[in-house]
Structure formats: C-alpha cells, structure tokens
Image (tube, rainbow, N blue to C red):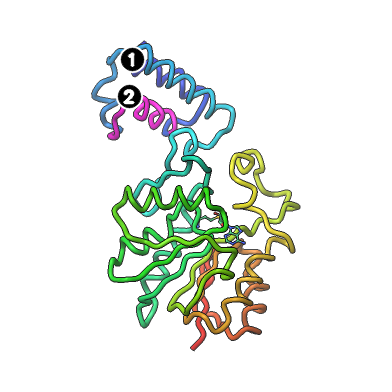
Amino acid sequence: MNVSSWLTIAKRKINALDAELILLNTIGEKDRSFLTLHEDKKLAEEELKKANEFLERRASGEPLAYILGYKEFYGRDFLVEKGARSLIPRTETESIIEMAKTLKPAPRKILDIGTGSGCIAITLKLENPEVEVLASDFSQGVLELAKENAKNLGTDVKFIQSDLLDSIDGNFDLIVANLPYVDEDWDWLDKKTLKYEPKEALYAEDGGLFLIKKLIHQAKGRTKYLVLESDTSQQEEIIEYAKEFGFSLARKDDFITVFKTF
Ligand SMILES: C[S@@+](CC[C@H](N)C(=O)[O-])C[C@H]1O[C@@H](n2cnc3c(N)ncnc32)[C@H](O)[C@@H]1O
C-alpha cells in the first residue's frame, strides 16, 4: 500500500491531521509536505503494521500524544510517557508562560508545583535561561519523565519530590501551579478521553479545589507572585479565597489567574 491510499483509508476513521502525523511518525519523517511529495511511496510491511496499529488506537479514542509518545508545548516536543504517564500538556497552559513574561519585576527564582511532564518549568527556563527554576511533583515516576524532558531540551531545571510545599524550603519570586482541579461530578466533561490520563493528575476533592486551596494556604508569605490554572467556573471562588491569605488579583484569562502579594 502507498502513502496516498493509506491516508485515504485512515481519514475515514480519524481526523486528517492525526492521520498524517501518525504516518509521518511511522516512517520517521517530520515535515507534512513529505506526504504530498511522496504520495506514491510504498509503505514497508513494518511501517504499515505500525501505522495500522496506531490508527486503530486513535480510532478507539486514545489521545494522539500517548500513541506518538510526545506533545508539543510552546513550540517544543515533550515526552508524555516513559515509565510513567504525565498529563498531556494543554494549549491553555501556554498562557502561564505568556503571563510570567509580563511580570514586573521579572521573577528570578521560580517554583513550578505539580510539574508533570515539566512543560511549564522547562519552558520558563528555556525562554529565560537567567532564571532559577525548581520543579516539583509528588509522583517520582513523573519526575523522572520531566528530568528526561529537561535533558532532551538541554536545560538545568532542578527537580524535587514534594507534596505541594511540604518538602520545599525558601521563598520564591513566582510560584506557578497547574494542579488537578477537575471535580469527578462534572458531567459536561468528555470523560472518554480523560480516562487515558492519570487520575491523580486530573481530579481533586472539594469541587476540584482541594489542592489549589491547600497550596494558597501554604504559599502565604513564600512568593511575590502566584499563578494558578483552574477551570473558569472556579476562578471567583479562588480569588475570594486567596484574598484571605494576602493574594490580590493581578490579572487573569479564562484558565489562568495571576496573584500578587505587594
Ligand atoms: C494537571 S497535572 C499538570 C502537569 C503539568 N504541570 C502541565 O501543566 O501539563 C497536575 C500534576 O500535579 C501532580 N500532583 C497532584 N497532587 C499533587 C500534590 N499534592 N503535590 C504535588 N504534585 C501533585 C500530579 O502528579 C500531576 O503531575
């Protein structure tokens, strides 16, 4: 079977972009124009077998990131599975990077809590190599994955295993956290795709706010800025809660809330 016929069949089962990305991955190419330029290329038996296996997994609902093993975040590829599975980095989380870049004075010492793949911590360091970045997670497996990403992308982020701030000393200019904030009772969520991701990366008690509130409590007096990701529906409650601990709203978008303490 050649490239063109495989794509025609695959596009009946999954979306066109995913079909192309699966085929490119299978044949070890990156550039989508390769497929147009080599429509008649005959697929080797091994390539066909792998492409078909990936196609079936995608057609049954598995996220493309886990099939290919990586997800792009802020223009760079992050492994999302190696030993452990991390949350798949989301586009909305990129706005944490944008927001961090606008803070004045520019933060020099940053802590990323619940780092998962390391996408936030590593990107902040790569965007500004001058900053000191510490990244934490309570899952050792996920920390190993994040370390691998840091190595592959050539950064020297430090990593530490910690339950929120329990094992972390010192103060920071900026603490960022995309903690689990999904309430298991939200029936409007598409649980079909979420079921592939680690539960401990997604769900939290107390309407999804248990970990966020605990962190706000712990972060009092430990940082100049606190940047939190949550669902839009949770932001008002978070802002009110954070006020009690000396955090005032600096800015926000649909998913990201920036607090300052000065
Ligand atoms: C929503 S994921 C975010 C991953 C990554 N920062 C991102 O934005 O893609 C939440 C992460 O928090 C970690 N986590 C959950 N509970 C935690 C806790 N009590 N202390 C530290 N990390 C925790 C999970 O292991 C998971 O990696």
Amino acid residing under circle 1: Leu
Check if residue 187 falls in the magenta segment. no
- Crowd around label 2: few <14 · some 14–19 · many ≥20 (10 Å): some
Q: Which residue is mark 1?
A: 43
Residue 27 is tagged as 2
Place of residue 77 in the rendered image (x, y in percent of width and height, measured from the top left) = 36, 46
Query: Mark 2 near ligand 1 (CB under 8 Å)?
Result: no
Place of residue 166 in the rendered image (x, y in percent of width and height, measured from the top left) = 59, 70
Q: How many marks?
A: 2
Q: Is residue 179 depicted above or below 60 in this figure?
A: below
Amino acid residing under circle 2: Ile
Place of residue 213 in the rendered image (x, y in percent of width and height, measured from the top left) = 66, 71
Please give left or right for residue 38 compared with residue 231 in the image. left
Query: Mark 1 near ligand 1 (CB under 8 Å)?
Result: no
- Marks 2 and 1 sit apart, C-alpha to C-alpha, by 8 Å
Q: Is residue 239 depicted above or below 127 in this figure?
A: below
At x 48% / y 53%, what residue is drawn?
143
Report the quarter where the N terminus lies: top left
Along the polypeptide, which appears first: circle 2 or circle 1?
2
Quarter of the image holding residue 192? top right
Which segment is the magenta one? 18-31
